[in-house]
Amino acid sequence: MGLLKLLFGSSSKDSKGEQMYEVRIKGTIQCNGPKTINRVVIMDKTQMQMFTGSKRYEAIEGWIKANYPGAKPKGSYRDFGVESKPVKK
């Protein structure tokens, strides 16, 4: 049973066995009018630490530029918030 559960069971860990995290990014951008961002992204621990570490504003800025090209922050990137928590099984 353990082998079948390992092979076919759903888990909150990726193929390498690392814990996955749910990262919620909140804020407001300016792109043809104000647009509110409230997005949940699933990441591994290394990526999650980029969004919660000392250079988190650079990570948020890079993520916004990649996902919303041409958008500017409503105020500054320091107005964005990030919440992270482990993914439940």
Image (cartoon, rainbow, N blue to C red):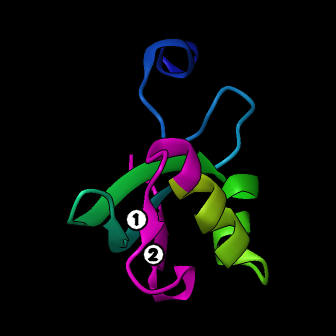
Callout 2–callout 1 Cβ contact below 8 Å: yes
Q: Position of residue 64 (x, y in %)?
A: 51, 56
Q: Residue at x 23, y 64 (%)?
A: 35
Given the image, on which type of amino acid does mark 1 rest?
Arg
Q: Is residue 70 magenta?
A: yes
Is 22 drawn above or below residue 5 in the view shown? below
Q: Position of residue 6 (x, y in %)?
A: 56, 21
Given the image, on which type of amino acid does mark 2 rest?
Glu
Q: Start and end of the magenta stretch?
A: 65-89
Quarter residue 59 falls in: bottom right
Name the residue tied to disc 2. Answer: 83
Q: Residue at x 75, y 31 (%)?
A: 16
Q: Position of residue 54 (x, y in %)?
A: 78, 84
The CA span between labels 2 and 1 is: 5 Å
Q: Is residue 45 magenta?
A: no
Q: Circle 1 — which element?
A: strand
Does residue 40 appear left or right of residue 66 in this picture? left
Mark sitting on residue 24:
1
User: How many neighbours does mark 1 have within 10 angstroms: few (below 14), some (14-19), or many (20 or more)?
Assistant: some
Q: Residue at x 24, y 57 (%)?
A: 32
Is 42 drawn above or below residue 3 in the view shown? below
